Amino acid sequence: MAEVVVLRWGHRRRDERLTTHVALTARAFNASGLILTDVEDNELVQTIKKLVSEWGGTFFIRMGIPWRVAIEEWKARGWVIVHLTAYGENIQQSDVLERIRLLEQNIVVIVGSRKVPDEFFSSEVADFNVAIGNQPHSECSSLAVFLDRFYRGRALSQTFKNAKLEITPQKHGKKVIRHSAS
Amino acid sequence: MAEVVVLRWGHRRRDERLTTHVALTARAFNASGLILTDVEDNELVQTIKKLVSEWGGTFFIRMGIPWRVAIEEWKARGWVIVHLTAYGENIQQSDVLERIRLLEQNIVVIVGSRKVPDEFFSSEVADFNVAIGNQPHSECSSLAVFLDRFYRGRALSQTFKNAKLEITPQKHGKKVIRHSAS
């Protein structure tokens, strides 16, 4: 199964919760990690690390690297760059997802905000510009639907290794199992 | 096609952008409107109204109504209440979505935050508790994936009436058409 890493561009301190939601969405939908480019935010990193230590898995987070350097680095490794943007090819109305899948490569998904650099839209940066619909909405939503479709829904049935907390799904009420350290 | 209205519980001023993203996600994925319960936030309403006037459609927004009143009102009209929560039945691993579809009713989707009242999980409030995976992530992501699956992807190919702005999807670059007033 192809691996996905999420590159978050345009994080600002006042957006801490939004970027946290992007990171948690990435993890929950089977991405391997998050690269927070151009800025550092240790509070955010601690929030994510704490959550990963409780809920399991191996989600990584890196920060502070300039976006150009990050893109060059992952391209050099053969990863395909997918930029999620309302301006791109519609995931429902075009065959863009099939074309991405056919490459059978690992993917860097760029998740920006409203004012991303124009270069993100060029073929020098993005191999694909993918629109989760051509309406303005949310980078969290775009990332979630892209990964849900890319992994054909299976991301949502994965289990996370070394979890201390695990939910047992209920029709009504809440049930959380707390695993003791092994 | 069944109609969906989104009920947002637990909005705080510091979360303005998150609730904005929830509202825009609701609109982009074919919900009819947003009910912001228990609080008022005129700034948020203006943000959404401005966006709707530019991008089209008839998305409504109501606010300030207590959540119990809202739930009772919509239940009395025969709408089914679906609460999105990580503790609920897994949308991928259970048949919960099929059971909801079989009812062929309109739906109120409750989108909360971490500390929703316990009553939301009870059968007095929620007809269904649905988990978009049983991991913590984001109410935007949950809403997007629920609506994407509920509408079998077709929400993303809808067009919005009376739009002043319309994106023409591009492989690279950005193209927006500005319609003159008719």
Image: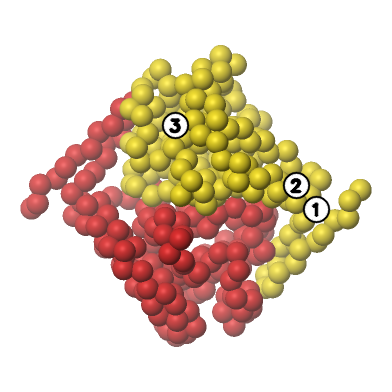
Chain colours: A red, B yellow
Q: Is residue A43 visible?
A: yes
Secondary element at tag 1:
loop
Which badge, 1 or 3, is on the more N-terminal residue?
3
Q: Position of residue B25 (x, y in %)?
A: 58, 47
Label 2–label 1 contact, CB within 8 A = yes
Residue in the image at 58% along x and 32% along y:
B63
Q: Return the x and y of residue B179 as percentages of the image width and height.
A: 85, 56
Q: Residues within 10 Å of mark 1 (few under 14, many from 20)?
A: some
Kindly report which numbered mark, 2 or 3, lies closer to the viewer in this rendering.
2
Identity of the residue furthest to the left in this view: A182
Query: Which residue was labeled with disc 3?
Result: B83
Q: Which mark is residue B53?
A: 2
Q: Quadrant of the N terminus of chain B?
A: top right
The amino acid on which the numbered mark 2 sits, given as a three-letter code, is: Ser
Q: CA distance from mark 2 to mark 3?
A: 29 Å
Q: Residues within 10 Å of mark 2 (few under 14, many from 20)?
A: some
